[in-house]
Image (tube, grey):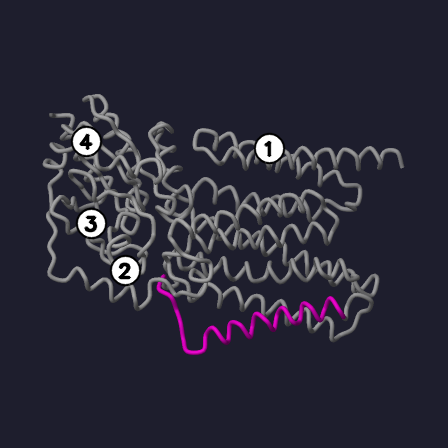
Amino acid sequence: MIDQQIGALFVQVAYIGASAAFILGLRGLTKPDTARRGMQLAAFGMLLAIIGTLLNHEIVSYQFIIIGLVVGSAIGLPMGLLVPMTAMPQRIAVSHMFGALAVTLVGIAEFLHYRDVSGGPGVVKMIALGFETLFGALTITGSFMAFGKLQGFITGRPVTFPGQKLINAAVFFGAVGLYVALVLTQSGGSTESGLIMFAVMTVLALVIGVTLVLPIGGADMPVVVSLLNSYAGLAASATGFAIGNNILIVAGALDGASGFILSILMSKAMNRSFANVLFGAFGGEKAAISAKSAEGLTTRSVTPEDAAMRIGYARNVIIVPGYGMAVAQAQHAVRELAELIEKRGGRVRFAIHPVAGRMPGHMNVLLAEANVPYDHLFDLDEINEEFHACDVALVLGANDVTNPAAKSDPGSPIYGMPILNVQDAEQVIVVKRGMATGFAGIENELFYLDKTSMLFGDAKTVLSQVVTEVKGL
């Protein structure tokens, strides 16, 4: 008995330590220069949580736990080491899917356990079990759909059909209605009808995940992934209440709250509301109409040699990284170019838009990987007023976040979205493979300005050529 009490005390101490590490780790992620330490703290917290859980006296066999550790490690290790940074958004979506799958399976197992052992889970337990299963199941399929859209085997365009919103609402309220019915009818007893309701609720939740993400365009996938992260966290927190695990409650609440706040911030960065993101079919017909505005306009191209002359003699350079840099893995060439400019007496800064790339912090992570100093990175609010004094703005595939239409064209689907004021620079050089549009599916007016020159080609290749030319100046 004393040993059990000591063991239980150790478990709770480990959980408290893990909770503190999670909170401090999350705080560390708020700044680029402390993000690495924040991740290390969070990883240490997870280690404490696992150790504490493994020492729980209620565990009667470690057989399946060991199997789970081996299988999970075999899947997670390659995902962490082999998946390129360009595929990080997809990898995160898959991680949400696996986490939601675990939560849902726990919810199903706990429901069946209470049903067989005690004739019903009770009101409080049923609220938690139903919530975790409902949100867990919709996160499974929602995350898979987001993964498919980001990976490209599901179209990134919004998929809509007549009556879609009505059908979605019917499925959603049907699942919620079954959840409420389960809480009211299964709190004190066990019936076959309760099992059927639980099964149908789970299936409807899986359908919701598909119908929720299908009509959302690729431009909004970062917000969707963040929102699904919030759902997974809320489901995990409910799991903690259902099985009496404190660390799940804390970690799930942190995950749910941070994901929700991040979704709000990202929506704000795109001047979009949640309702518009979830139901607006961004990237559809309106975007296609706006793309016609470029008809009859021409661009001006530049060679790597000419670009090197302009950049090499510039005193003030602002580099705007985008998804084009990520696809080409050009961050190391960018860092080398920045170092050359500084050696020649110029000043280099990096302008980071909050939704550049395919996930929050995508550009920050890539540049950190290339050892670009943290004090060279500036957020939109910090750098926007500096473009008017910039000699050359170098844009690396950042389409929508530099499009002046967000300020000048009320008919544009991105109108009102905060953008980087690249058009205020004295000269603009845009590195792109071709004239393909960005996630929003519209032409970028920046490309057709008299001050803009297009440097066509793979970002890594052409920037390496620019670096070679600057060295020869």
The C terminus lies in which quarter of the figure?
top left
- Note whether 322 is above or below 273 in the view shown: above
Residue 409 percent coordinates (x, y): 25, 58
Residue at horizontal 51%, vertical 41%? 77
Tag 3 or tag 2, which sits nearer the N-term? Answer: 2
Tag 2 or tag 4, which sits nearer the N-term? Answer: 2
In this rendering, the label closer to the viewer, 4 or 3: 3
Distance between mark 1 and mark 3 Cα atoms: 46 Å
Secondary element type, mark 1: helix
Residue at horizontal 49%, vertical 36%? 29
Secondary element type, mark 2: loop
Tag 1 or tag 4, which sits nearer the N-term? Answer: 1
In this rendering, the label closer to the viewer, 4 or 2: 2
Residue 162 percent coordinates (x, y): 41, 78
Tag 2 or tag 1, which sits nearer the N-term? Answer: 1
Q: Which residues are magenta?
A: 156-184
Secondary element type, mark 3: helix
Q: Which residue is mark 2?
A: 410
Q: Which residue is mark 1?
A: 44
Whether tag 4 and tag 3 are in contact, CB under 8 A, the answer is no
Name of the residue lying farthest toward the right: 1
- Note whether 201 is above or below 57 in the view shown: below
Residue 278 percent coordinates (x, y): 45, 62
Distance between mark 4 and mark 1 Cα atoms: 41 Å
Distance between mark 4 and mark 2 Cα atoms: 40 Å
Name the dominant secondary structure of the magenta segment.
helix
Residue 158 on the magenta span: yes
Q: Which residue is mark 3?
A: 446
Residue at horizontal 68%, vertical 36%? 51
Q: Which residue is mark 4?
A: 467
What residue type is disc 4 on?
Val
